[in-house]
Amino acid sequence: MSTPLLLEPLTMRAASARNRLWLPPMCMYSVDAEDGVVTDWHVRHYAARALGGFGTVVVEATAVAPGGRLSPRDLGLWDDAQVEGHRRLVEAVHAGGALAGIQLGHGGRKAGTPPWLPTAEGGAARTSTLAGWDLVAPSALAYPGHAVPRALSAAEAHEVADAFASAARRAVEAGYDLIELHGAHGYLIHQFLSPLSNEREDALGGSPEGRRRFALETVRAVRRVLGEGPEGRVLGIRLSATDWVEGGLTGEDTAVLARELVVAGVDVLHISTAGNVPARFPTGPGYQVRFAAQVRQAVAAMTTTGGGSPVVVAVGRIESGAQAEQVLLTGQADAVAVGRYALRDPFAPLRWAHELGVDGWQEAGFPAQYWRGTWA
Ligand SMILES: Cc1cc2nc3c(=O)[nH]c(=O)nc-3n(C[C@H](O)[C@H](O)[C@H](O)COP(=O)(O)O)c2cc1C
């Protein structure tokens, strides 16, 4: 039997993941001390998914500036003192056999909310901006239910791009193999991209080219830090391909953007949707995969600045080995990310290898210590 595509290695610049399954970034809101520093919870949580067989484990949205945290309990990399904890996290992920990635972000107008943990009544608390938070955004337009942000000056916007680069430098020091910029879900980079949240008339707005400028500037600044050649660290970006509303970003806009991002130094395009404005959209199995396919088609003939092929990651209710394999076999993506399913089953990759007929412990990626527990 031939090896499923899902279990084929994935090469990105000098890094090689053992398979094509990603743990996407998922906020844990677990920094009890509110200082952005990695805790034992983070180490255990991410190490478990690495042992579970994921080829690439991407650590949750990590703030590049304190005011950019989505909640006070977010991870950070705005200070050199935060590097040591991330080093511990990277070592734990590597010990489980996975590449270690980190998502760097700034919440913009959606920053400064309480952690989204379950309330006593059940359900997640998603209340508005915490009092006193200095909320910034491309334009002084509030996300419904949140405080009205202050529009960043052009100089301040460049400072935020620099903060992304400084945080990326710290991520490299911590040993991360891959840096993913959070350009999705209505956070700052997405706010600049979308006409629904960017009404600027200076060089950072005013036209599709202007609205793309902040994302591209940030990518170039981070690429310089990561190294330009084939040995440079892997740079990814997560995008919301569509705002799912009339007048917002569309899959076509994102296909154009994706090509410019690859020229600017991006290796990986991780394609999600939504989050910039309230919207209703279908959320069945694989609900976002077609947008990944559209981006993959747009960049298919391109070469990254590292000399390889751009990698496109699909995400969104991919919940079985057969479904994941189908996404790859039909050429819709190069890798798939598995979020909520992996919260209930850290061993999803080993389970899915079994579903696809791979039971040998080495082929499936079982840790040697667990070989007696294989499905065979
Ligand atoms: C608890 C939780 C936290 C999340 N945090 C992030 C995050 O930090 N960054 C991000 O880009 N997406 C985040 N997401 C979105 C997931 O990465 C993923 O795109 C989404 O859950 C859809 O994939 P799934 O259907 O496999 O869960 C989060 C999702 C969940 C459930």
Image (cartoon, rainbow, N blue to C red):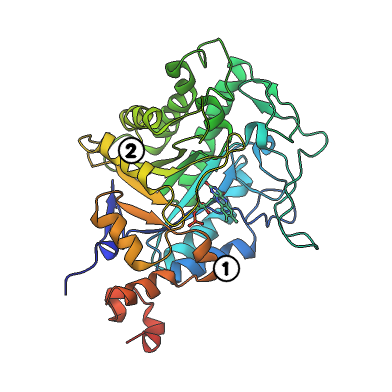
Bin the neighbour count of mark 2 within 10 Å (Cα to Cα): few under 14, some 14-19, many 20 and up: many
Label 2 secondary element = helix
Front: mark 1 or 2:
2
* Residue situated furthest right in the rendering: 131
The spot of residue 353 in percent (x, y) is 33, 73
The spot of residue 144 in percent (x, y) is 70, 33
State the residue in front, 61 or 95: 61
Question: Who's the residue at 52% across and 16% down the image?
Answer: 205
Q: Earlier in the sequence, mark 1 or mark 2?
A: 1
Question: Who's the residue at 54% across and 25% down the image?
Answer: 192
The spot of residue 138 in percent (x, y) is 60, 22
Marks 1 & 2, CB-CB < 8 Å contact: no
Question: Who's the residue at 33% across and 77% down the image?
Answer: 354
Residue receiving disc 2:
295
Residue receiving disc 1:
44
Amino acid tagged 2 = Val
State the residue in front, 54 or 250: 250
Amino acid tagged 1 = Arg
Where residue 253 sits, quadrant-wise, is top left
The image shows residue 283, relative to residue 340, as above or below, that is above
